[in-house]
Image (spheres, rainbow, N blue to C red):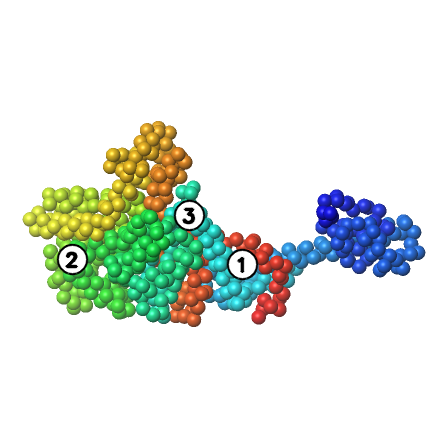
Amino acid sequence: MAKRKVDTENRGFQTRWESEYMFTKVAGKPVCLLCGESVAVLKEYNLRRHYETKHADKNKNMDMEQRLQKAEELKRGLKSRQALFKKAKSQGQAAVKASFILAEEIAKSARPFTEGDFIKNCMIKVCDEVCPEKRQLFLNVSLSRNTIAERVDQLSINLKEQLVKKGKDFIAYSLAVDESTNISDIAQLSIFIRGVDSNLSVTEEFLALRPMHGTTTGHDLYEEVSRCVNEMELPWEKLVGLTTDGAPAMCGHRSGLVAKIREKMQEENATGELTAYHCIIHQEALCGKALKMEHVMSIITRTVNFIRAKGLNHRQFKAFLTELETEHGDLPYHTEVRWLSQGKVLQRCFVLREEICLFLDSKGKDTTQLRDVMFLCEMAFLCDITSHLNAINLQLQGRDRVISDMYSTVKAFKTKLTLWETQMRKENLSHFPSCQTMKEKLSTSAFPSTQLADKIGMLAADFRRRFADFEAQKSRLELLGNPFAVDVESSPPNLQMELIDLQCNDALRAKYAAVGAAEFARFLPGTMPQLRIQAAQTLSMFGSTYLCEQLFSLMNLNKTSHRSRLTAEHLHSILRISSAQSLTPNIDELVEKMGHHQVSPSTSNK
């Protein structure tokens, strides 16, 4: 005989039971109005037995009307208590949510966890003036150092869980890896992931920052990267690209990180080929060194240091410029690590070249080199070419950059270099304003246009050499950049039929013209699966380690000499929150997980 199921018997609560047995229905269950107990099964026999066993003597002298009044009074009291409980629960959840929101803001602004106490004191003072009756609500918001640290960790875990969930949908992903040191001289390995799902939506997020307490060999780097990939439960066969800073430990042919990951992919029987790139921005900056004009920069750096290093010289120089009513009132410093600073220093020094010489003369310094015609021509050229290099550098920076667009930028710059070299040999200085200024002050024969054209040729040759690996991927990148201009015959056989269908489709051609290359991939129809996979793989690739460099700046902003005891775990949590782009912490979910927790004022003030 089958067991009876109470749920299927459609038993309903009858109104008369309220006055007869002093029961009411709360959340689908019968609850006694007298003692608050609930009965498991909604059945009249169970209600009657409970009433007769526990409460019969209390109400035996009441008539039916009195019973009805008593039941209504008890129901009102129950509803009042429920409303009070809901309000307390709601206020408690609001206090917890507020602490999460403020913890997120503290992490994003690189403030120490102790800022929570300061913020709370400010909140209380404002409350006392604006709404003193709500002071207790503000006191209930816990913002102690330990609470903020705990909230930051919870927010970070939530973001990581979201990333792991998204990672399960990736059909292709790539990694960007770079290494630097923090204020404690501990090597830090920064890892970012760029994944593409079946809808060709791109997710670009921080994966991990791993401290390297020992050596930083290729094997050590591989162990950390491998651990991150496994923790994320990412399949190795979907790894498409790896972008690094080009250091030997990263790119060594036998024992570098790239070689180790390729070995791992072979072990995992991955069918795809790993494409490894040296950061485009880093390579572009290294190309500038091919000009071999350190002798010019060293003289300028020495001059700037003389003026800026001593407070008295610096003050007198600024006063001197003010007296002369020059356009610029000071000289900037040049920092070797910050590539863009060189252009700013050169530009300012060239504009203020005469004023600088006058000031140095007043200090008894020799200015023969600074007045030399050849030096001034070289400085003008270096000023102009550095300005061009800085322009391309800025174009290559930023988040969500598509590698095909970055390749196009470099390709365009190489074409410009060829044009500039030709024009320089013909003494056409249209794109070199500083050189034009110098040429106007000199006779035509004195301007060294041939030597400077040779410098441009050297720069162009270095660009071709350093970006040879991108030339090898030219067809792949152009397939995403402009699939309508790709030669079908020279394309891989598995793409040819789909390419013909694509190039003959006027609607898709119009869509490409409307949305551009980066967005167009998402409009490829499901009938072109090979093109979609190819687009996903190219979209997933990092062109640079810009995000890693940006993270190191955030790291140095958070882990300072005043916060040197910040733990690696807390630093990791802070960086995940402050670098998040497409993901946002689900604070409502975190509050819900904490249940009915409400922080008391005594705990919050510890």
Element at label 3: strand
From the viewer's perspective, is the residue at label 1 or at label 3 nearer? 3
> Residue 521, how many percent across, how many down?
37, 39
Task: Please give the residue where the numbered disc 1 appears in the rendered image.
Answer: 100
Q: Residue at x 49, y 62 (%)?
A: 153
Question: Toward the viewer: 350 or 222?
Answer: 222
Task: Please give the residue where the numbered disc 2 appears in the rendered image.
Answer: 292
Residue contact at pointers 2 and 3, CB within 8 angstroms: no
Task: Please give the residue where the numbered disc 3 appears in the rendered image.
Answer: 170
Numbered label attached to residue 442: none
> Residue 95, how many percent across, how many down?
59, 59
C-alpha gap between disc 2 and disc 3: 45 Å
From the viewer's perspective, is the residue at label 2 or at label 3 nearer? 3
Question: Toward the viewer: 252 or 599?
Answer: 252
Amino acid type assigned to the residue bearing label 3 in the image: Phe
C-alpha gap between disc 1 and disc 3: 30 Å
Amino acid type assigned to the residue bearing label 1 in the image: Phe
Splitting the image into 4 quarters, where does residue 142 fall? bottom right
Element at label 2: loop
Q: Earlier in the sequence, mark 1 or mark 3?
A: 1
Along the horizontal axis of the image, is 600 left or right of 269? right
C-alpha gap between disc 2 and disc 1: 53 Å
Along the horizontal axis of the image, is 399 left or right of 160? left
Amino acid type assigned to the residue bearing label 2 in the image: Lys
Along the horizontal axis of the image, is 369 left or right of 467? left
Q: Residue at x 35, y 35 (%)?
A: 512
Q: Quadrant of the C terminus?
A: bottom right
> Residue 327, how many percent across, how many down?
26, 54
